[in-house]
Amino acid sequence: MPEVGVCSWSLRPASPRELARDVLSCGVDAVQLALDPLRLGALSESELLAEFKPNHIRILSGMMTTVGEDYSSLQKIRETGGLRPDQHWPANLAAAHQNAALASRLGLNVVTLHAGFLPHDAADPLRPVMIQRLREVLRAFASKGIRVAFETGREDARTLLSVLHELRAESPGVNFDPANLILYGMGDPVAAFRELAPHVVQVHIKDATPPSRPKEWGEEVVVGTGCVEWTKFFDTIAELRPTVNLLIEREAGESRVADIKIARKLVMQIGGV
């Protein structure tokens, strides 16, 4: 059976104790852990482990954020997201090496990240730059025995698939987020999952409505109230990747625990987990 957990950053914890409390309040005992708060000292690694161990909370995977991301508009995230900005590349590569060491200490074997907008056109001069940067990040984590999974959404499934094939020697995976495809207007989540299924190592449970105008993005909403067709989506997971872990993510709203509990109920009722 797949594991069901919650993304730690969804809970906006001020301390390891608060994180452990809220994870259990969500009705789960597993997390995808944001690594950078530990790497940068905002949260204590030793305190986190001291809180997680007696509460039997397991860390299923890690997540790395990149430097300088600006989500104020779709254009801003296109310019600043992932590994794309030249001025932040040295810092992002250094962070990858540091996060790889941290993930290794925590016993993780998967870390996810947003690569940044990936050019579809092979002739785009940015494409080889991005491929080389992705390759270096993949190798940084591979040196510690950790696989990297790129999160879906900022490009369509076919573009991401072409990048995966180009990087196949480094064995990248996919963190499949159906809501991101809707938020960025990048296609149908079920069809995209079918294309990317052989590479999917983790799924985010998140929902959204599409953009109302071109060059804008959609709105993240409570799971079950958006445009993800959950019955079809879970049926497709059961057909193609039945053991993949499911991590509930909520990045909007002020009732995070309550919203995550709604998502957990939907996973149980429709996903059968």
Image: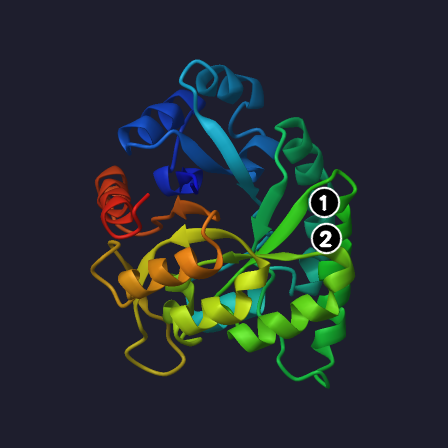
Image height of 91 relative to 102, above or below: below
Which residue is rendered at x = 42% and y = 76% of the image? 187
- The CA span between labels 2 and 1 is 5 Å
Answer yes or no: do the residues labelled 2 and 1 have beta carbons within 8 Å?
yes
Q: Is residue 122 left or right of residue 188?
A: right
Q: Where does residue 226 sit, x and y in percent of width and height?
A: 24, 64
Image height of 5 relative to 19, above or below: below
The answer to whether residue 224 shows anywhere in this view is yes
**Tag 1 residue:** 141
Residue, far front: 239
Q: Where does residue 239 sit, x and y in percent of width and height?
A: 43, 60
Check disc 1 and report its element: helix, strand or loop: helix
Q: Where does residue 49 sit, x and y in percent of width and height?
A: 52, 20
Tag of residue 138: 2
Check disc 2 and report its element: helix, strand or loop: helix
Q: Quadrant of the N terminus?
A: top left
Q: Is residue 14 left or right of residue 228?
A: right
Q: Quadrant of the C terminus?
A: top left
The answer to whether residue 81 shows anywhere in this view is no
Residue type at numbered disc 2? Leu
